Image (tube, helix red, strand yellow):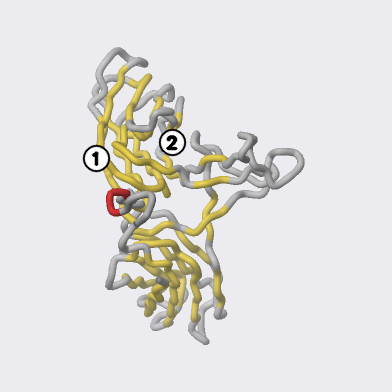
Amino acid sequence: MIDLIKLTVTAVGEDESASGFALSDQIARGRVLAIFIDSDPAAFESTTIEISDLGDPVSETILGIPEITTDLKFYPRRDVQSEVGANLTYDGTWPVFEPYIVCGQIQASVSLANNNQVTTFYIWIENLAADLDFLTFRIGPTVGANGAAAAEYYGPAINGEILAVHVDYEGGHPNTTDFYLLDKDDPAAENLFSKTNNNANLKVYPRRTMHTNLGAVINYNVGGTAVAVVKPPFVGRLFANIAQSNPGLYITATVWFERKPLYDFSRHTWPPG
């Protein structure tokens, strides 16, 4: 199902520096597909617009356009990453993009405009309200010696596909800190996402490479650099841990996922009849 959100912003203040914002009445839960900016016919030349998700702990900009004075429509997309946080590309330079994931109120803002300047925003969202969810958890405190302290988190059992992950390093983590996120019930113990030797906050859309029926990595080009990617599935308890850090520290993480309920095979028998 696709929803259309309409937000109207009237800038208030001195000409050329007026600003304003509007919030959606409802919580948007899904993928941003397209955005149309209906500009004021008398829009000031420096007018700047921005759209973001208030439910996003990093307030990532979904669309930000400076000096917009005409009506324009956009299809904003975000780059995605590998399971270790590296930006994925089709040939080493062309990024792989997907729609932005939102799970909160949508905010549209206008700045550097004239007083009483009106801008209307139309935002198309693929509604995943029944399936899109997120989990925020805090890991810590870390225990151990400097450079070797660790902590673990055991989460609830969840079935679905990982959409995005945000990691907030609280306090003074050293740059040797490792963070791992995985499905504790995965027999392969494969990381859904991991970042080693890092202490900078980050947000990623982690993806895994796909394979042929012979096990070869699927590529879009002869050189083998343009990999085909898929959202990693999980059917079990989320598990996260910190390693190689200093004692007494925490990490707060948010995981966005699309729920995929387990199929109930007990309702069917084979052979039929």
Q: Is residue 234 above or below residue 29?
A: above
Q: Is residue 172 above or below residue 260?
A: above
Q: Between residues 123 and 15, which one lies in front from this camera angle?
A: 123
> Which x, y percent locates residue 155?
25, 37
Which numbered tag is attached to residue 156?
Answer: 1
Q: Secondary structure at mark 1?
A: strand
Res 1 visible? yes
Who's the residue at 38% across and 32% down the image? Answer: 186
Amino acid type of the residue tagged 2 in the rendering: Phe
50 relative position to 263: left or right: right
Amino acid type of the residue tagged 1 in the rendering: Pro
Who's the residue at 24% across and 28% down the image? Answer: 140
Q: Is residue 15 above or below residue 208?
A: below
Considering only order in the chain, which callout, 1 or 2, is on the residue closer to the N terminus? 1
Q: Between residues 265 and 44, which one lies in front from this camera angle?
A: 265
Placement of the N terminus among the 4 image quadrants: bottom left
Please identify the residue farthest to the front as the structure is shown.
273
| Mark 2 and mark 1: Cα distance apart in space | 17 Å
Please identify the residue farthest to the bottom as the structure is shown.
41
Placement of the C terminus among the 4 image quadrants: bottom left
Res 58 visible? no
Instruction: Read off the residue under disc 2.
Output: 193
Mark 2 surroundings within 10 Å by alpha-carbon count, few (fewer than 14), some (14 through 19), many (20 or more): many
Q: Between residues 187 and 5, which one lies in front from this camera angle?
A: 187
